[in-house]
Image (cartoon, helix red, strand yellow):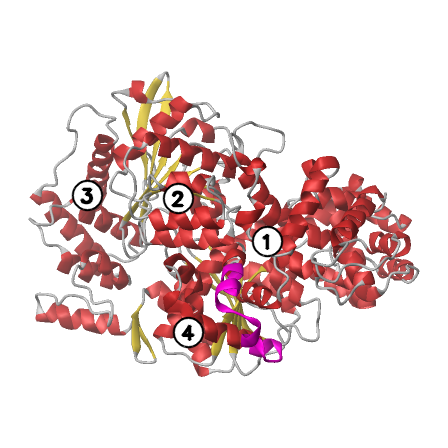
Amino acid sequence: MDELIKSVLDKWLEIEYYHVANKARFVNSDGTLKVSYKLILDTIRCLDYLTTVKNNYSLNYVITVIALMWEHVERDEYDLRNFILKILTRIGYPTSAIIVDDKFDISDGKFFRPNSVIDMLALTLQHQKNEIKINENVFLLTDFQMEIWNGLNEEKLIGISAPTSAGKSFIILLNTVSKIISENIDVVYIIPTLSLLNQVTEDYNKMLKKLGAENYKIVNGFNPNSDNNFNTIYVLTQEKALAAFSNEKTAFSKKMILVADEIQNIERIKMDSDLRSKILYDTLIEFRNNKNVEQIIISGPRIEEIDTLGHRIFGKKAHDITTNISPVLNLTYSIKKINERFYFKQYCSIKDNAFSRPISNANTIVGYGNKQYSDEYLEFLINFIQKIGSQDQNIIFAPTSSKAKEIACFFSDKISDKSKDLNELIEYYRDSISENYAMCNTLEKGIAYHHGKLPMHVRMTLEKAISDKVIQNVICTTTLMQGVNMPAQNIIIRNPHLYTRKRTDSAELSSYEMANLRGRAGRLLKDFIGRTYVLDESGFEGLDEYNQFDLFEDTSVELPVGYGDKYEEYKYEVDEVLSKNESVNAGMNKYGYLVSYIRQTVLRYGKSAITRMNEVGINLTKEQVAAIISKMNNISVPKEICLKNRYWDPLVLDSIYTEFESKKLPNIPIERGAKTRLNEMLKFLRDNSSTSHMYNQYVPQQHREGIGRSLLCNACMDWSCEKPLSEILSGERYSGEDATENIDSMIDTLQKVVSFNIPLLLKPIFDIYENESIFLLCMQAGAYKPITRRMIEIGIPRETAIYLNGKLFDKSVFDIKGEVDVESTIRNVIKKKYAFLPYWIQVQLEFMI
């Protein structure tokens, strides 16, 4: 029987291989193997045997064979729905049967009725053990999802590790919503990217409405004056979550559930330059010591010993819920050159060896072994996609954001057919950004590009269009790996390089990141198979991350925790700086953040800082801490100023406090002289020896002096004064030959430098001299009017908030008092006028309706 089981798998994979190879036209003849009646019978026999007789059978084998059989069988000749439903239910994956059931009733979760009464009764009983009911709504779950559900109802700290399509995020959502309905509790959901923030916000909104929840609100920022009568779902980036702790008395003072999704992002804490991972870690440590946290959930794909990770972060025993089973079969195909001959290879996670055959017409392959994206290579790429994915949704991986745009523009120039479905979206981008915005041209041909530098309103609307399948081909960067739900059957990647010109600091996709990227192929409950195509396997060879015997395995990762490793690596240097009382400077770029962290912790906690630092892996003696306390007592800058600027060295803050000439700082950006004062502050930070390294850290090279700095100051003022993006991007600079490059460059500057870096850089000065000023808040939001800023804080994209303020609101609407009333009025006005707004504006407001 074992031989038959192996033979059945090999035969289906061979059929699949030739099906794909023929589509790619890598074989000259019709090499497709036919599905025989005998193979169907053998497959049924094997699957029935494994799921009824065999102990400890491979779930991955069963899912793989079912997926391949359903994909390649003649469905008019063989009606296998009843059998597949029965097998999937047996193995604990009844929900996947939705794919084979064209009569599935989504409203009440009912499948078609099996022909046999006995089968129907058996399936009904098996389904009942996997069903949960919330407010009369029934949900059918997999065995793994049921394990998560039970764990969430019983444990205080839960670590969940599973492949991308295992449905873990859905159960976290469902369980937290059920608790919001039945308890007086908040949810704090921390996510790594703005794209995922939009998705999670929308998912919560839809589920709460479906289940008839009341007395709740979803927000994307922390407001200490929020009404505690509502159950609040905070969907926050780590930056916004940590910022809430600057006022410790009001930060998350209600009973709550903490969810840290995509926890694998903490891995980059070991990189000196990655501040976001450190912010994520420091945020979790703050929640560790928050007594209002009732339950903690951490989740991510393929994380080793996630219970140990949870224990090391939160200091409590964690419950581990892990699986390596995915309901979507992910297959990887690659082009490999061996001894001057090209081969087409098929990788399957349950096979030890790749299936490989020579490519007959290898003369069509271009650019193999190269890093540059020449026109010839892009021609080959687009032809390949049109062959293998002409009827599918495809994601083409690009190494950088600029290359993603370049590839999309090239594709759109080569495609003749125009997309009629996207005219309204194109006009919306032209009106809200620029006539010369590159996305407008690519969308005309149904091509889009997606990366982390897109404006928020573009990101939200574009992801909606992709989800609605009106865009077939998306060129995407590493944003794809951050949990964003962009459905696609195929992912195409050239190599693991995250660059086109190699430098000493050039990065590669790790094998773990590659596994997560491959896991994005195939839509959950829509596709049985997702395919990844690697067009240049040579790019992976020789990299330490990749095992030559199992190049595209489903890699898991053990995440580092804390600062212990880095401290041990630079212990001598750190201890010496602390003992000499030197301030952090540019020469300490490898370990300066550790010096700042230690001083800040000692300043905040005094003698008990020893315990706090032990929690994160830094072990100082009592004598060292006492010496630091003594030195911190001699600085002039008030302690509360230091605590509000946790990533600054207190000695550098002291330099600002004693050396900056205090003049009146602007309260709001429209004040006369605000731009002049902004320029003076930046000049001081640049020219002061103690602060110049922070200036260089936050201000890109091209904006540090001269015309570049003048351009930056103008951008800061335009953005803060609520000037619409379309007006900022008008003028000669944003037309002509360099228009698209300058548009993208300014958008990136506004979103990264103006709204994030510059407020962080200027914050110490404002904390010292103008504590009540809202100037930096206006710069962060890109708006100065209270109504516009409040809409942005709620989660409405800046450009849309500016539009709505002009269209829906006037001063008479807000004859009210208090932050809560303002938010309530905004929501009520939008709900009342929603039906009259343009469609793509409505898309961005769905979470409020």
SS state under label 3: helix
Q: Is residue 245 above or below residue 363?
A: below
Q: Which tag is nearer the camera, tag 2 or tag 3?
A: 2
The answer to whether 715 appears left or right of 65 in the picture is: right
Q: Which residue is mark 4?
A: 832
Mark 1: few/some/many CA within 10 Å (<14, 14-19, 20+): some
The residue closer to the viewer here, 458 or 597, is 458
Q: Is residue 523 left or right of residue 624?
A: left
Give the dominant element type of the magenta stretch: helix, strand or loop.
helix
Query: Closer to us: mark 3 or mark 1?
Result: 1
- Element at label 1: loop
Say which label, 4 or 2, has the lower sequence index: 2
Query: How far from the left and from the top, in percent, is residue 586?
Result: 78, 41
Report the amino acid beneath label 4: Lys
Q: Which residues are magenta?
A: 801-821
Q: CA distance from mark 3 to mark 1?
A: 64 Å
Q: Residue at x 26, y 20 (%)?
A: 361
